[in-house]
Image (cartoon, grey):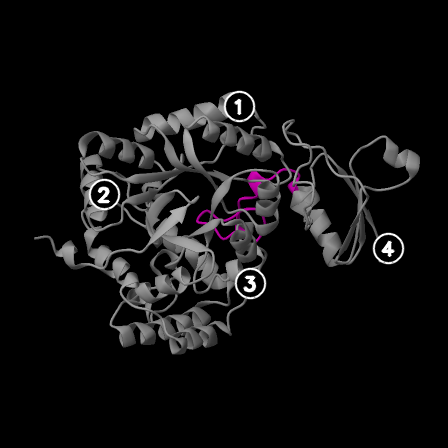
Amino acid sequence: MSSLTFLSQPEKVLIGKTLEVPRMISGLWQLAGGHDKHVDLDVATAAMDSLISSGLDCFDMADHYGDAELVVGHHHRVSQQRMIAFTKWCPAENGIKTFQQAEEAVNLALTRMGQRQIALMQYHVWDYSDDTYIHNLFHLRTLHELGKIQHIGLTNVDAAHLELLLNSGLPIATNQVSCSVIDRRLVRNRLTSVCLEHSVKILAYGTLLGGFLSEKWLGQPEPTDLESLNWSLRKYLRFINAVGGWTCYQTVLQTLDSIARKHSVSIAAVATRHVLDLPAVGAVIVGSRLSTESDKYTTSNLSAFSFSLDEEDRALISNAQENLTDIPGDCGDEYRRAPYLTASGDLSHHLTNLKQHSQISKAIAEGKRIEYSSGSPWEPLASYSRAVRTGSIIRVSGTTANSPITSIPVLGGRVCEVKLSLQSISSRGRFKLSGDR
């Protein structure tokens, strides 16, 4: 009898009210490179079968995660075990807005994964000032209505833009964002309340900081040779530095260790349970290399479902978090503005009009008046600006944007509280900086 028979079974959650998945999803980002140079399809299939047998039958990947979609396709052909496969569409910033491109992307994913329907297609937005993402998401809605996609999700989208898309009539089921005991943006900003209001489930990744939340790093010095670290550790070392550095992180790690010893589980189990207990979190995504060694982590991962944190535990975690610095901005901002908390570092090459964004950010810091023009011929004639920002106040003229999608009359819905940001304003407009305060 397999030893996995006696492991804790994962809790379940409904995605989009119809799709039941375990609250622990196996993430396949590590197949994208930066961890292993070669993926053996047969070994990967065996590792997936083992995870499925333990109740972890849901896998998350993306179009750019190396051979991940092909691994799923191979498993579909050779294994009798059934699984649930999530993927992502992260199109290049080429300005193409056609339905044909979206359908080709979905068809390619279906072919690679050997699926008839994509359980969850998640979309990544690089630049909010480029309205291509709005067109693409409405194309995905059409493909959802045609039955090629069961549910639509987002990745790394902030509260304001999630709310905008939901109020525009898009059936968003999930939003995949970073969340951990040190990355508290989900609960300290508006995203949790927006998700709870609209029944959007958060799929939380980075829960274990790529492995930093484990006994291996307890009491250890900070690594200085970044080249010796894999992509995951390199990425989440940036998070550790953003919240105050190695000493602050070690304080949290020591607290997790004391709670883990109390419940006879691992540090990783405590870190995972903490995130699972947060409002709006549907599931956590735990990375897997799908190797011959994958099984040795299964027991520890599943132990997150074997105990509960009590009030004393939560108080200890809260006290340890008091010395942490908040990561700037909202969830997902690390992909669009400094500090770029990613494996590769600076991602500014994905953003349009970066120089203008930098100038405006500097002007805001200096308290200058900023005027925004949409380019309308009426503005110079009537002597007004579409929007004016002074300090923390933005005043917008009494008209709204036409939707780029002809099937909806107003982007954001007829009644929508819009919280403007520099990145949400169309790049087609023109800014004027003034020294007036």
The local secondary structure at tag 3 comes to helix
Amino acid carrying label 4: it is Asp
Query: What residue does disc 3 label?
Result: 188
Marks 2/1: CA–CA distance: 34 Å
The local secondary structure at tag 2 comes to helix
Query: What residue does disc 2 label?
Result: 48
Q: Is residue 206 above or below residue 110?
A: below
Side (left or right) of 347 relative to 20: right
Looking at the image, is mark 3 or mark 2 earlier in the sequence? Answer: 2
Amino acid carrying label 1: it is Phe
Marks 3/2: CA–CA distance: 36 Å
Of circles 4 and 2, which is in front?
2
Side (left or right) of 153 relative to 330: left
Marks 3/4: CA–CA distance: 33 Å
Q: Is residue 170 above or below residue 189?
A: above
Query: What residue does disc 4 label?
Result: 436
Q: Is residue 86 above or below residue 282?
A: above
Q: Quadrant of the C terminus?
A: bottom right
For the residue pair 179 and 342, the one nearer the viewer reads as: 179
Looking at the image, is mark 2 or mark 1 earlier in the sequence? Answer: 2
Looking at the image, is mark 4 or mark 2 earlier in the sequence? Answer: 2
**For the residue carrying disc 1, how many other residues have a C-alpha within 10 Å: few (<14), some (14-19), or many (20+)?**
some
Q: Which mark is residue 99?
A: 1
**Going by the picture, which residue comes out furthest to the front?**
17
